[in-house]
């Protein structure tokens, strides 16, 4: 993908982060990860300048979408925007309006877009369920069978998340693994 098209994908991700008018560090981190994944060896994206261009409206959604001509590039831009909008665990009405407008501008295949939206929704639900559920291993005196069951539940959840697109999976798997390790340590009397 050319640097100009990469810049358009990043601009769309930034516009997605700003769509709800709230500043969320998780959305910013998702944009940073996207910039790193798009950068090849020796390439670096000037994110501060791109932020300025987006905030000062020198770069619009229409302009960024028009620069993406290949269907795969347009699909990638949409998927990254969905990931950024969902990075905080939910999509506001403003973000949903933004994604609908983006889908229209990118002239996406409705079936592919809907399939990705379903996958993204499942990932968010799995992450919320795992994050909000009690961790059996967090209690100081846990039976080995209960600890094993907790580890198995984390493994199953992380395995299911791994089936989703990489950018979504990594947003949930690492925090779940850290929570699991913390719970195991606490079950064995280790204070972190």
Image (cartoon, rainbow, N blue to C red):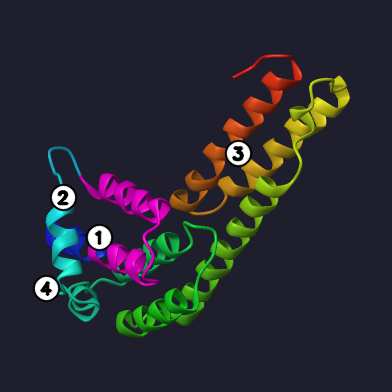
Q: Quadrant of residue 41?
A: top left
In the rendered image of this protein, does residue 112 appear above or below residue 187?
below
Question: What residue do we see at 20% from left, 59% from top?
Answer: 6
Q: Is residue 16 magenta?
A: yes
Label 3, on which residue? Answer: 176
Instruction: Tell which circle, 4 or 1, labels the residue nearer the N-terminal end.
Output: 1
For the residues bearing labels 2 and 1, Cβ distance under 8 angstroms: yes
Predominant SS of the magenta segment: helix
Image coords of residue 83 (percent x, y): 44, 60
Q: State which mark lies toward you, 4 or 1.
A: 4
For the residues bearing labels 3 and 4, Cβ distance under 8 angstroms: no
The front one of 131 and 148 is 131
Image coords of residue 137 (percent x, y): 76, 28
Instruction: Tell which circle, 3 or 1, labels the residue nearer the N-terminal end.
Output: 1
For the residues bearing labels 4 and 1, Cβ distance under 8 angstroms: no
Query: Which secondary structure, mark 1?
Result: helix
């Amino acid at each position: 993908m050319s640097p100009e098209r990469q810049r358009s994908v990043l601009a769309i991700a930034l516009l997605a982060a700003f769509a709800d008018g709230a500043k969320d560090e998780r959305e910013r981190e998702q944009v940073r990860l996207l910039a790193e994944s798009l950068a090849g060896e020796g390439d670096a994206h000037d994110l501060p300048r791109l932020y300025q261009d987006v905030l000062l409206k020198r770069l619009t959604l229409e302009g960024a979408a028009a620069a993406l001509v290949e269907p795969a590039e347009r699909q990638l831009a949409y998927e990254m925007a969905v990931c950024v909008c969902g990075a905080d665990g939910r999509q506001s009405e403003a973000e949903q309006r933004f994604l609908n407008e983006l889908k229209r501008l990118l002239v996406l295949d409705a079936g592919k877009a809907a399939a990705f939206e379903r996958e993204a929704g499942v990932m968010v639900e799995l992450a919320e369920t795992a994050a909000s559920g009690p961790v059996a291993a967090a209690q100081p005196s846990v039976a080995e069978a209960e600890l094993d069951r907790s580890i198995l539940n984390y493994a199953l959840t992380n395995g299911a998340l791994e089936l989703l697109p990489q950018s979504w999976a990594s947003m949930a798997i690492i925090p779940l693994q850290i929570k699991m390790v913390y719970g195991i340590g606490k079950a064995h009397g280790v204070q972190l």
